[in-house]
Amino acid sequence: MAEKNRYSDEELLEFKELILKKLEKARRDYELLWADVTGSAGNDTSDTSPTFKALEEGAGTLGKEDAARLASRQLTFIKHLQGALLRIENKTYGICRVTGKLIPKERLKAVPHATTSVDGKAVANGRVDPRP
């Protein structure tokens, strides 16, 4: 039997549904993080006494820096998921960009925005010689 060179339309639809759910959650998480960064979440010390405000100012700054870093990572994740949706529309989703073979379903379910198989990633990172 010949090896498949792409996932079927039904399989792509399953992946699309999975990605859309992850994208929805990722956008909600990003909005929460961004609200924390901008202070629009309402969880700051602006309504507390000056004593508490002085004690919490340093921790608040560190918290906002952490939230900003997490928000940036979340935005990158969102962009990767959007790229995966585009690959689904182009019917190139699930094809390893290094080996040209299908990425196993198990990997795509765990990392739906993956563009390389485990073997392809090892080759791309220089851990495996791509020559036979």
Image (cartoon, grey):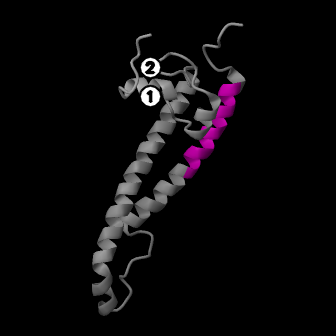
Quarter of the image holding residue 46? bottom left
The magenta region covers: 11-25
Residue 7 is situated, as x and y percent measured from the top left of the image, at 64, 20
**Residue 24 within the segment the image draws in magenta:** yes
Residue 111 is situated, as x and y percent measured from the top left of the image, at 55, 38
Badge 1 local density, few (<14 within 10 Å), some, or many (20+)? some
Residue contact between numbered discs 2 and 1, judged by CB atoms under 8 Å: yes
Q: Is residue 115 above or below residue 67?
A: above
Q: Residue at label 2?
A: 98
Badge 2 local density, few (<14 within 10 Å), some, or many (20+)? some
Q: Say which of 50 and 58 sits in front.
A: 58
Q: Is residue 7 above or below residue 39?
A: above
Disc 2 residue type (three-letter): Val
Q: In what element is the residue under mark 1?
A: helix
Disc 1 residue type (three-letter): Lys
Residue 54 is situated, as x and y percent measured from the top left of the image, at 27, 86
Q: Say which of 50 and 63 sits in front.
A: 63
Which mark is on residue 121? 1
Query: Could you tell me what secondary structure mostly forms the magenta stretch?
Result: helix
Left or right of residue 108, residue 53 in this image: left
- The quadrant in which the C terminus is found is top left
- The quadrant in which the N terminus is found is top right
Left or right of residue 103, residue 57 in this image: left
